[in-house]
Image: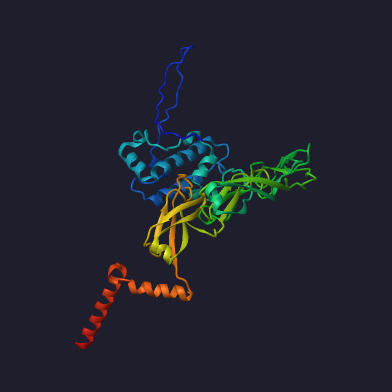
Amino acid sequence: MRVGGHVSAHFCARPAVGDGTAQRVMSTKKRDYYEVLSVSREASPDAIKKAYRQAALRHHPDRNQGDPDAEAKFKEAAEAYEVLSDPERRTRYDQFGHRGLGGSAGLHDFSSMGFEDIFSMFGDILGGGFGGRRRSRGADLRANIEISLDEVATGVERTLEFRRNDFCDTCGGTGAAPGSKRRTCPTCNGYGQVEQAGGLGALFGRVVTACPSCSGRGEVVVTPCRKCGGRGLAPKERVVTVKIPPGIHDGQVIRVRGEGEAAPGGGRGDLHCYVSVAAHELFERNNQDLICRMPLSFTQAALGCGVDVPTLNGRVELRIPAGTQHGQLFRLRNQGLPGLQSGRKGDQLVEILIEIPRKLNEEQQDLLRRFAETEDRSVMPESRGFFDKVVSYLSGDRDEAES
């Protein structure tokens, strides 16, 4: 498919070289796009879409085989719709005509495009009733892959072994015995498609579908292949290596093109690999960051200490300052996971969990009692602030009750 801007061209007659006679050159002046679709300049987007569908059906190549005028009008209608369906392009066209579209990016040269490309572009508008001569495609396959968090950090490859329907080695997928000939399908006369009522018939009359006799191939098998029985397919074992990039998330899908099942006379589908990331015993993921919860005794938190923190890259020493509180976070830069697109690493957050012993011996209890006698709550901002609020709240309740 060639993509480029439209250029409004005019060819003038000029003398031919050599014989001195004048050659007639047809003018290629473009018609007005509203005229092409038979709508007014005030037509709504829905009216323009409906008009395009009707024009496409009227000049459809399957209904006008061998008619070059119909082919030209079919492409002309697609060109008109591409412009008038876009608000910005339509405004420029209304103001400046075809000259205003000379520099528009993304406009297609429909005159050089095949029908398949046009069907692909406007398939959601034209619908299945307009079916083009598209190459059939086999079914997609699904595989589940589980990886560890460590493998998310580095990326990994997985080898998959599975069985699929593939092209028969004996007949090459044709379904015909080697050396035999295929003959033109008598139902569709070799075209691969037939007209029938139904589907969109209530709105557009008769529609075009794949021929049921030849499955759209235009030919039928005379002598079937013995190995595949004329199906053109046979079950085969397949081994595929799937590359899983660093930073992938749980539930994401990797598509391996062309590794699905084959379709007779067509191509293969795709293999969809659904990735799941197993839970880690130490780390919890938050996008590119990792969270590690580190338990400390209350004496370690009160006095401060040095601890070895596990990371996906090994141990890292972390200094815990004296007076660290429960739930306090410490950040280890660049110890997280890489971004799937950027590759930039996140951080690892270390959350402190202060553990209170459930059982104390007599000596420990005695030490704590003596320590409690030395506590000065006035220098503990959290405790002081909380108890001040308690006193104020209770005093307010009493005053309200007395009043």
Q: How is the image coloured?
A: rainbow
- Could you tell me which residue is drawn at 26 percent across and 78 percent down? 391
- Could you tell me which residue is drawn at 57 percent across and 56 percent down? 198
Is the residue 299 above or below the residue 216 in the image?
Answer: below
Q: Where is residue 195 in the image (x, y as percent from the top left)?
A: 60, 49
Q: Position of residue 25 (x, y in %)?
A: 45, 24
Relative to residue 233, is residue 195 drawn left or right? left
Is the residue 73 above or below the residue 345 in the image?
Answer: above
Q: Toward the viewer: 13 or 273?
A: 273
Q: Toward the viewer: 302 or 194?
A: 302
Q: Position of residue 106 (x, y in %)?
A: 42, 38
Q: Can residue 114 be seen in this view?
A: yes
Q: Where is residue 243 in the image (x, y as percent from the top left)?
A: 58, 45
- Could you tell me which residue is drawn at 52 percent across and 59 percent down? 282
Q: Which residue lies furthest to the left in this view?
A: 403
Q: Total marks drawn?
A: 0
Q: Toward the viewer: 135 or 357?
A: 357
Q: Which residue lies furthest to the right in this view?
A: 226
- Could you tell me which residue is drawn at 76 percent across and 47 percent down? 228
State the image quarter where residue 79 is shown.
top left
Q: Can residue 128 be seen in this view?
A: no
Relative to residue 101, is residue 282 drawn left or right? right
Q: Toward the viewer: 267 or 23?
A: 267
Quarter placement of the C terminus: bottom left
